[in-house]
Structures are given as C-alpha cells and as structure tokens.
Image (cartoon, helix red, strand yellow):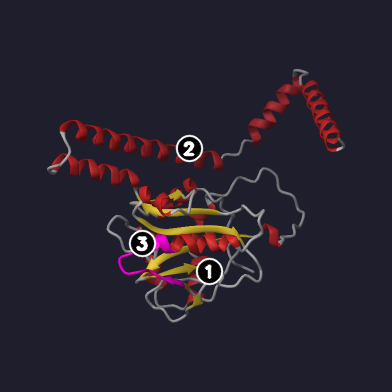
Amino acid sequence: DNMPGWCLIESDPGIFTEMLLGFGVSGAQVEEIWSLDAGSFQHLQPIHGLIFLFKWLQDDQPSGVVVTDRQDIFFARQVVNNACATQAILSILLNLKHADIDIGPTLTNFKGLCEHLDFETRGLCLAHQTEIRNVHNSFARPMFFEFDIPTIATVEDAYHFVGFVPINGKIFELDGLREGPIEVADIPQGGSWLEVAGPIIEARMQRYSAGEIHFNLMAVVSDRQRNYERQIAMLLQEPSLLGAVDLQIEIANLESGVQFEKEKKIRYKEEHQRRRTSYVPFIMELLRQLGETGQLMDIYNRARNRAVQTATFKMFEQNK
C-alpha cells in the first residue's frame, strides 16, 4: 500500500526515446514498427529488442516455457501498477551488450545493486528506485482537474507492455507479470532473430477478436544519426567502389538522413515539453476575457446549435 506511484505511459516512440535519455542511456533510440514483414526491419538495423503493447487478458497463457533458473538473463517482476512501460524497456537495455550503446551510470548501478537478487526482490528494488521512477513519471500528462470519484478498472482498459529480446541463441519474452522470462523460440544458426520473432508476435495478435486493433510494436535500435555519420566518415576515409558522382549522391543521402534525425530529436523534445505544460491558466484567462467583452455567450449558443444540428442529422441518417 505504501508503494510509490507510477503514471501511465503512452505508446509513443518519441516518449520512449526521451525516456532513454532521461535514464542516461546514449547511443540508442526507439522506432515504431508498422509491419511485421522481414523487409520492414532492414532499414532499422541493428535492432536490439522489441517492445510490444497489447490488451492484457486475465487467463492469457504464456507463449512459451517460463524459466526461473536463468542467471544470464536480467528479469524483474512487476510489483506496482503502470510500471510495465519502463520495465519493458529496461528488460531490453539490461540484457544488452552492444558497442553502440552505453546504458549510463543510473541503470548500471541499478543492475549491479540487484543482479544477485531473485526476480521478486528485483521488482521491489525497481519500484523504490527514485531516479528511474522520476524519469518515468515525468511523462505524465498534467492533471487539469481532480475529482474525488472512484473509478473502476475493467479488463477492457488493461493494456500491457512486454519486451522481446535475443539472448544466447534464443528469443525471450520478458513480461514482468510472469514468474520469469518466457523462452519462446530458438534462433537458427546464422539466422535473424527478427524473422523468428515476427511470426510469434503476429500469432499473439491473432488470438484476439477480429475487431481488436489496439496493438503497438516498437524497436530499440542504435542511434540512427550516429549510424549515418559513421557511414559518411567511412565513405570519406576509405577507398570506395563507387564512382565520384555516385559517392557524392550516397553522401548526400546520408547527410539528409542525419538532418532528418536531428529534426526528429528536436520535435521529440518539443512534444515532451508540451505534454508537461498545463494550458488551464491560458484557457481560463481566454474565457474570462471573452466573458468581459460579451462574446462568450454568443460563442456558446452557436456551438450548442451546431451540436444539436449534428445530433439531429445523425438520428435522421440512422432512421433512414
């Protein structure tokens, strides 16, 4: 009952990328996946893990074997509500060993603190980890008004994040609501783990009713701006089979990619700032001035008349 609160997090690559920066991670970002076709992953390589959002079902069975004795996998149980977004991304980062990505001191210290603890105790440690929780909660939308009315959560409202990650030749689903990591598939020798993971996630979607479309899939990838800049440096420093004109075209394309990624990072920061801004004072002042100048009731009456006309038209269309 005394657990610190965690807010709900939107499934948005900009939010998750900003969250990585807040944790102190460098060299990584999050991208949305629009298709499970193998070719759709190619331009995002290397992909280090997948974050999957889906509707949680009470009696949903694991998609593989739950293992509780793997010391080479970092896994923590989810012991507080709404922490699954952070737990999904941490489940990827804390199992990651890649030259492109530095997880930073905050996550390194957290991992070292609870590396030898059991899964449940790790979850408790995370729930009380102030730095991580504060970053998570910084993405809460401002509460404009507070109502002292109890709400009833339903199964329809419950959405959940999990992580998929390749570890030592196997694919694991890391779901903090399970007893341990779920071993879902072997990765063929020399094969791509994404070609195996795609059909598994697609099969998960097929379990739901035909009208259910509330899924989201994101990938943790290496910083794309750095990748483009690294490719440019290689083209400039090393001999190339490309002709002079083709070389300049390739460099121009990569520079365009660098610019696109820079602009995207600026946009993510601006969107994050807007999420944290309360516009209530502006709205209240606007309403006050409209009232003082005698415009408010006229605007209200016109809006009400449009609403009545729209409702009447809809009823007419339904009764045809």
Q: Is residue 37 left or right of residue 231?
A: right
Name the residue tied to disc 1: 176
Front residue of 242/49: it is: 242
Residue at 56 percent across and 53 percent down: it is: 9
Looking at the image, do the residues carrying marks 3 and 2 touch, with CB atoms under 8 Å apart?
Answer: no
Image vertical order of residue 314 relative to residue 117, above or below = above
Q: Nearer the viewer, mark 3 or mark 1?
A: 3
Question: Which is more N-terminal, label 2 or label 1?
Answer: 1
State whether residue 189 appears in this view: yes
- How far from the left and from the top, in percent, is residue 80? 58, 66
Q: Is residue 85 magenta?
A: no
Front residue of 26/226: it is: 226
Image vertical order of residue 171 relative to residue 158, above or below = below
State whether residue 21 appears in this view: no
- How far from the left and from the top, in percent, is residue 115? 39, 74
Label annotation for residue 22: none
Which residue type does callout 2 highlight? Glu
Name the residue tied to disc 3: 192
Quadrant, the N terminus: bottom right
Image vertical order of residue 267 relative to residue 75, above or below = above
Question: Which is more N-terminal, label 1 or label 3?
Answer: 1
Name the residue tied to disc 2: 270
Q: Nearer the viewer, mark 1 or mark 2?
A: 1
Quadrant location of residue 79?
A: bottom right
Q: Nearer the viewer, mark 3 or mark 2?
A: 3
Which residues are the magenta region?
184-196
Question: Which is more N-terminal, label 2 or label 3?
Answer: 3
Which residue type does callout 1 highlight? Gly
Q: Is residue 247 left or right of residue 194?
A: left
Query: SS of the residue at dot 1?
Result: loop
In this view, the residue farthest toward the bottom is 69
Query: SS of the residue at dot 3?
Result: loop
